[in-house]
Amino acid sequence: MKRIVFLFAIVVLFSKKSFCQGKIEGLPISVKIKTSVAFSDGSVEIIGESNSLNAEPGLVLIEVITPNGKTDNLSTRADKQTGEYFVKYMPKEMGIYKVIAYASDKVQTANTTFNVLAEFDADEIVRDFDEAKEKATKAMEASVNNVVAAQSTPDDVAKAKQEVGKVKVKIKEFEGAFTKLKTALKDLQTLTKKYPELKSIAAPQLGQLGSKLKESSDLLKQVEKDFGKSKAGESDVCNRYYQIAEGCALFSSAMNFASGGILAIGKSIFIDKVWPKYYESKALKSFTANDNFVFTQAGKAGISAIDGLKELTTKSFGAGMAGDLVQFVSLELMKKYCTEYKGPISGDYELEFKNSGKMYMKYKLTYEGKMSLYCLKQNLENAQKAGSGKIPKFSGYIEGNVTKMEFTDDVWAVEDKSDWDEIKNQRIPAPVIPANISEKDPGFGAVARAASPGSFYFPLQAQLVQGKMIIKLMPTLSDFTDAFANRTIVVVRAKQEPHNVSGAVFNYPITTARFILTRSMRMKDDSPTVTIDIKTTNGVSTLAGDYHRTETPNDTKVGFNMKLKMSNE
């Protein structure tokens, strides 16, 4: 496409990310490996998304470069409706493999790698997960004991011990079923070493299991790290309550992720795929009496493990594994010892660019979430008794997610269309979850919610001064990622050369949540604070804010709307 050079002069007031058209020649392509662990002689699943120059499914060419430098060529077609593609590849040697996927117009490429391990080792594959689970459990227990000892009664101490005990009982139930699965896997390992055909059949599912356990281990290590932040010496007891509640929620999330995946893969191994194929294999005819015994015992142990793991789908596990402990810390202890102001936030942000008065790009995002500020009741009471010289300090957070994205554009407002006929124009708004996930969360916690597209999370610090709450936005813990963007795919054909067909992606980055919040509440960059009056009626104190702002420099329009309301009710 011939391009008209067009520069947007955007005042720094409106965006921390200077806006750029983000035009990329060629159609988009992505690629990834479905599992992070793979074994030789077992197929690796390569997946991604592609697009086409017309309405037909796009052809995806894939190069797999082996550890010894050889190139294997694969091809597949993307789904006509979703653009998703899928292909299996059978590695034959150990080491690092490089994957290059080509878009259907062969302009853009996407790359990834995967590692093929030598042999399946049942002990090694579960060792890291078991260690991470044990350390996370000990860290959870230590953190709860420390915070209860810092501010509690003997009844609180007894209740904390009881709630931690409930979690440990559920973990033991999980371990009972998981131990049976490990026994079955060891027997399977014995057979696969002796019969290569069996190894090939089982390798994909064993790779999936290894990947799931590795990802679960990483989550549990994060749990241990988060509990470590809640140290006994930290003076902000209410913030420790909050950190522990979030750590328990993440622990539940990790165990839910692990148990659900293990159950699904266990069924695939012992019921749906691997075991039925074993019965059809030639290797089975070569079994000795001892092999038959090992095979039978492995099958029995696997089925027994699945029966036990089915319990993990109940409310007692998953989100509920540490649910009672979360409730005890976040509701009973926090409500007893802390004063908390909390409530909903909502708002929208609109950005429009024009070229000589003609709309080029416009989007409007709507968000919802919640806000909380808390401090120890005793500290607040002491400050009130001491008078104006004592200023109580609060900790807290503001979090939310984009629930709606409206997006449109006209690339021909800045591109010269005279030589081209447009044959495809596909707008792809940034993906959002159409619900306030901070209120819909079944108990997985803020860390899990932060993985959702269009989510944000910021710690807060505040001070209560003469009937006003001065709130400061602290450094970002979670904000919109670069992948959270609006896109338009345009395919054109040259008028004078009909065979000349080309595509391009126009990428429009979304303004960060931090920018939206600070500008909505007119916070300064060097000191992002806002002051809100506290109004008390019938013993209930309320903080409310209603913010509106519109600016139109040159060919740009920016609009902000935000509401928040917190109370100690």
Image: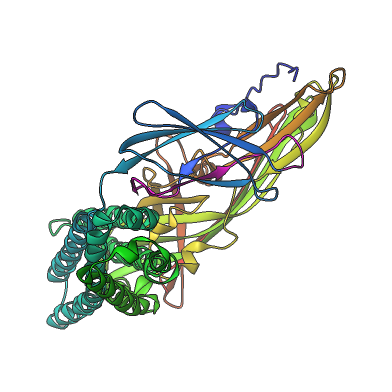
> Is 469 contained in the magenta span?
no
In this rendering, the answer to whether 310 lies above or below 364 is below
Dominant secondary-structure state across the stretch colored magenta: loop
> Is 48 contained in the magenta span?
yes
Q: Is residue 86 left or right of residue 441?
A: right
Q: Residue at x 41, y 67 (%)?
A: 264
Residue 146 drawn at (x, y percent)? 13, 66
Residue 298 drawn at (x, y percent)? 27, 71
In the image, 167 versus 351, the foreground residue is: 167
Count of labels in the image = 0
In this rendering, the answer to whether 539 lies above or below 86 is below
Q: How is the image coloured?
A: rainbow
Q: Quadrant of residue 125?
A: bottom left
In the image, 142 versus 471, the foreground residue is: 142
Residue 188 in view of the camera:
yes
In the image, 5 versus 519, the foreground residue is: 5
Query: In the rendered view of the protein, which quadrant contains the N terminus?
Result: top right
Residue 232 drawn at (x, y percent)? 13, 60
Residue 309 drawn at (x, y percent)? 33, 75
Query: In the rendered view of the protein, which quadrant contains the C terminus?
Result: bottom left
Residue 16 in view of the camera:
no
Q: Residue at x 45, y 67 (%)?
A: 441
In the image, 421 versus 462, the foreground residue is: 421
Q: Is residue 308 left or right of residue 430?
A: left
Q: Quadrant of residue 104?
A: top right
Magenta residues span 34-56
Q: Quadrant of residue 181?
A: bottom left
